[in-house]
Every structure is written in structure tokens, then in C-alpha cells.
Amino acid sequence: MTDTVAMPATGGPAEASNGTGFRVVHRTILRPDQEIDIRPLYVGGVSGFGASQSEDDAGASGTSASDKGDAVNYSNADKSTTTEAVSLSGFGKVTDEGAVVLPEQRLTFGTYFNAFPAGYWRRWTHFASVRLQVTVKGEGALTVYRSTAKGHVQRADGVTFDSPETQTFTFDLPLKPFIDGGWYWYDVEAGEAEAVVVSGSWGFETDRITSGTLAIGITTFNRPDFCVDQLVALGQEPDVLDVLDEIYVIDQGDQKVKDEPRFADAAAKLGPKLRVIEQGNLGGSGGFSRAMDETVSKGDADYVLLLDDDVVTEPEGILRALAFGDLAKSPMIVGGQMFSLYDRSVLHAYGETVDKWRWFWGAAPNTKHGQNFATRSLRSTKWLHRRVDVDYNGWWECLIPTKVIKEIGLSLPMFIKWDDAEFGLRAQEAGYPTVTLPGVAVWHVPWHEKDDTIDWQAYFHRRNRLVAALLHSPYEHGGNVVFESFQTQVRHLLSMQYSPAELGLMAIEDILEGPQRMHRDVLERLGEIRELRKGYDDSRSELELDAYPVPRRKKPPRKGRDTAAPVGPIGRLKTVARGAVKQVLPPSDLSREHPQTLIPHLDLKWWKLMQFDSALVSSADGTSVSWYKRDPKLAKDILRRSVALHSQLAKEWPRLAEEYRQALPDLVSPETWQRTFEASRKG
């Protein structure tokens, strides 16, 4: 460590005379107007420090800074635990001056947005060390920590300071020990007087000091308020605007973004950097393909950043993703993680992979959904310290090099669902990996607040999962995906969900017809799906429970007990058998006049629904309710067709896989998509 007045930590890359210079890639984020509920993502108070703790090993070994002869003045006697405060109250505050540490208190920047994800920079770049620069003033001690991939915490370096004037301290820190993961961060503890963290940054000496440029593609459908919120926010970020070529808003709705009252002001601030393109509703795949195509055709941007229209972005994350893309060993996709828009300290998606046997997406190995940083910190949660490798990144925030698009094409015409996963897998096969980079994130509506597996989107879930498997599964017959598709049909039938079951059959029929209809379907299938669903009770809903008769049933639950979830394969088999017997029996007359029960969405399980002849079922977002009714004749017909179609799909899988793979280059080509864009405009 050297004590030097270096370039300002919040500054951008500056070119040196020999063609190299220092490039900042990760700035400490300090915002005095920050909302309280997300503050634990940025900075926290610390009441003591010692061993790293986690949910699975409260006694994981760590190294106390005092054991290393650190100069930090620990004002609390408890050295055996680390306790970070949800609030800064009593520890410090963030002002226009910086982060103020109260006397004999301590703040940590070992947080989601302000710790440095060293393991990712170690794996995907050529750098051997990273430089930390922190500007402080007042009286106190600055200590740098690192974690291992096992989640153990170690002191890396430190310094004391005592001056009313600002001082900038520089630490050159090795990346060699981070091959499997780990983070760097720093803490600041005040002495008898306040200490202030003015700024901080992490960066590298490099000859790639000039930032690449990016275009931003936002696909929107009838969310003009959300979309304009994003435009307003982007217009207030000069550092983002400096690297921005153009923002493409692909408006596919009938509630136009341009008609939103605040749009004019947002557009005036963005000026020529904003372009709104109106086209027919082609779903996320059509909107993002248009943004990709426009970016590549113009040729002025190195990347396109895809953003959903209903997200709130951490702008600094955009710059971090761009820097990572610029400095990576080779071109790669850089994605952001997803926090819940409703519970904003909860990390909903850390990284995602595709289970190749089941062919189903999900949380990457060794990660968990729902990490709440308001109750458990980064430094004390072991699994967060491993580097996580992914197959793809959701298009809520995803930076794609234009080089990749030129080589592998645009999105498949999937409308919605699996388009991002398929693109990531296709890029991976072409030699372009995806990195989901911690510290790059948006806030987005979480999946558990949606009914997308049982509403109109059920068709796209099923068809696109199967099409992606046909294209990319390493197994000759797709692994277990055909059998799981049939299992889904059975669960729908046992649950009286006849609409999604019918949509599942429609999806398989379309797949069997061949890939040539996919561009036709991205234009027309949605309207046909909505028309089909009108004939099913489970797809009709009311806003109030009072719109339906009061629930009644002839017999009370057996022994007054609620149905329990089946345990193990044999238990599930027995439960399915009981449900199958019930399906052939006629429903009671009373169940046609009155629902037998009310089932909250939280309890929407097939083994619970199958015991009833009818039930009121609430929606995932809590805004409406549907009356499910058992129909043995309809269930028998759907089951018969399900057996036949899944048998045909399994038999023809190798032929279909070859057919879809042969058709892929044309399906994703700009020329084919441009015809679809034009057709949607005319429609």
C-alpha cells in the first residue's frame, strides 16, 4: 500500500503518455437521497468483527483484524461475531460530503453494490491485481478485507489517517487467490472524531482505457409510465450518456410512450440519443430483436444493452457491465442480477443455468433465490462468495456485444419465454460465454407474483422450452423433457386447469408442424390463444369474491384434516392414482351451483385442487379470482390427445431436432426478422 494523492476515485479513464492509463471499473456508490429499504445493499454499520458467519456454519473461520495487528480501534468488546446494522442509525450517515462515520463507530462497504467481485475479474480478464483508491478525511482507520470462495474473511491491508484535509490512499491488491471466487471490500472506523469517506474506486492499469459505446434497447407494451421513468432516470446520468450511442424504445402497445405526459421533457433531455420505434406486438423476442437489428445496422455501438420496460436500474451497474465487457479476455455477454421490485433488499435471481437432462431453467448450482440483504449481509453469507458460472442471463438487463449478434443472429421468434435462455445457449455454443456479474442489477417484478405458467403464456412456456431443447439438448431424445411435458399435462388436468392443458397441446401440434411457422406465430398466435381461452372456466376471472356464490360442500374434510403434500415417488404415484379415479367420477350437483372451497394462490397445488369438484382460486397478484370446475368429459379428451401427441413427439424427436437446427440460421436472420417487423406494422 502506498499513501498518495492519485487521480480522483470517481473519475473516468485517463490516457497516459505511453498509451496506458488507469481505468476505473467499479466506483463506490454514495447517495444521500437513497431509500432506506435498499441502503443495506450499499453501506452498513458494524458493531463488531471476527469470524465470518453463515446460515450453514456460524463458526466459519475468519481472521480478526486485531489479531493481525490492525490499527482499527474496535469500540465494541465482542470480537466473536460480525453484526451489520440494517440501518445506519447510530453508526453513520450519507451526505453530500460522503459517508460520515460517527465517532468510535464503523461503516462497512462489504455490501452487494460496493464490494468488488474479485473472483469474476480473476476468471474472465488477464489482470493480476486490482487497484483500490479511497479518499477520506477526519480521524480513523481504513481496513481492506478479502474473502475466499469458502466465505472466510481475511484482512488484506489497512492504514490510519488523521487530517481535516482529504487524503487518497491507494492499495494494489493481488487477484491470484480468487480463482474460485471471493470479494474485496473496505471498512472505515472513526476515532474520537468523525471520519468521512469522500469517494472510492477500483480499477486497473490497462491500454484499453477508452470505453466502448452502447445502445440501449427497451421493449415496452402498455407500460408508458414505467418506460418514461427509465428514460427520465437515464437522462439524469451524465456518465451513462457519455458512453451511450442511442436508446431504442420499441413500443409495441396501444398505450403509446409518446403520449405519456412526461415523455416530452424526457425526450428533450436525451435529444438525438432517443429513438422511439412503433411496431406491432411481437413480444419480448420481437422487440429485443428489433433493438439488436437497429444497433447492428447503424454500426456505431459496440454493445446493445437490453432492458425490460418494468425495471428500475442501478445506473452504475451499466458502467460496470460495460467496463467488464471491454476488459474481458474475449467478447462475452455480461448480464445483471435481479432484485425484487416489491421487497427491494431481496435478491431474486443471482445466476441461472439450464438443467440439460430435464431441460428446465433455474437457479445456478450453489445459489439460492430470495437472499435478503436486510437480514443477512454479503460478508456473512457463505454461498455468495463462490464464483457462479451461468448458461444465460435474463433480458431484464443484458449487455450483448454487436460482434456476437452479427455472428449468431437475432432472437428466435418465440414471442415470450425462453428467448433469452436460447440466445445465451446459442452464444455459448459459438464460443461466447455469459457472465452474470454481481454489482450489476435491476429491480424487477419477481416471478412468484405472476400466473405465467397457467395463463396465456402457458403456450409459450411449453412450445419454447421444447423448441430450445430440440435445438440445444445434448441428448438424442431430449433427455426427460417430453416426459415432464406430459407430467405437466396431468397436473393441469388434476388441478382443473383445462385452458393451459389445451394450450400445451396446441404448442406440441405447432412444433410437429415444423419451424417454418414460427415467424407466422409470433405475429398471429397470441390473438388465437386469447380467443381459445374464452371457452374455459379457469381462464375467466372476476375482481371480487362476491361475484361468485358462497362456497359450500356436502361433506367436511376427512377427520377435519387438510390434504398433505405427497412424500416421495411412491407417495406421489398413489396421490396421482387417487386423483385419476376422481377424474372419471361425475362432479356433485352442488359443486355446479357453489364452489366447494376457496384456495389462495399460495396454496395452488395440484394435490390440493384434485380433491375438489370446483374451487375459487385467486390470482398470483391478488387482484382477481377464477372459478375452477371439474369436467370429466373434457379431461378425458385432453388426456387422450396428450398421450397421442407426446408419443408422436418422442418418436419424431431426432427428425425434428435436425429440422429445427437446419432452419435456425434463417429463423434468426435480420432479413427474415425485417419482413416480420414490416408485417407487424401493417397488421
Image: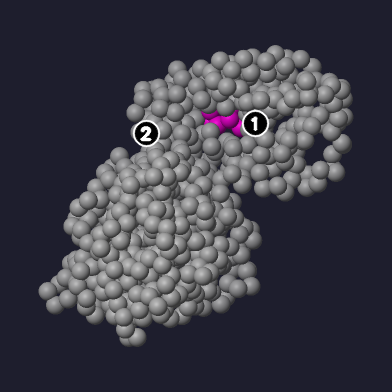
Query: Which residue is located at x 54 percent, y 20 percent?
Result: 568
Residue kind at label 2, given as amino acid type: His
Label 1 environment density (alpha carbons within 10 Å; few <14, some 14–19, many ≥20)? some
Label 1 near label 2: C-beta < 8 Å? Answer: no
User: Which residue is the site of mark 2?
Assistant: 472
Give the answer, above or below, for where 19 lies relative to 323: below
Q: Furthest residue to the bottom?
A: 165
Q: What stretch of residues is rendered in magenta?
A: 502-510
Q: CA distance from mark 2 to mark 1?
A: 31 Å
Q: Which labelled disc corresponds to residue 514?
A: none
Residue kind at label 1, given as amino acid type: Lys
Query: Which residue is located at x 61 percent, y 47 percent?
Result: 449
User: Which residue is the site of mark 1?
Assistant: 605
Asked if residue 121 lies in the magenta stretch, the reply is no
Instruction: Count how many numbered circles sit on residues in the image.
Output: 2
Is 550 positioned to the left or the right of 399 in the image? right
Give the answer, above or below, for where 670 lies relative to 73: above
Is 203 positioned to the left or the right of 648 in the image? left
Q: Nearer the viewer, mark 2 or mark 1?
A: 1
Q: Is residue 193 visible?
A: yes
Please, what is the dominant secondary structure of the magenta stretch?
Answer: helix
- Expressed as whole percent of the image width and height from the top left, the position of residue 126 reads 19, 55
Is 117 positioned to the left or the right of 599 in the image? left
Residue 201 is drawn in which quadrant?
bottom left
Please tell me whether mark 1 sits on a helix, a strand or a loop: loop
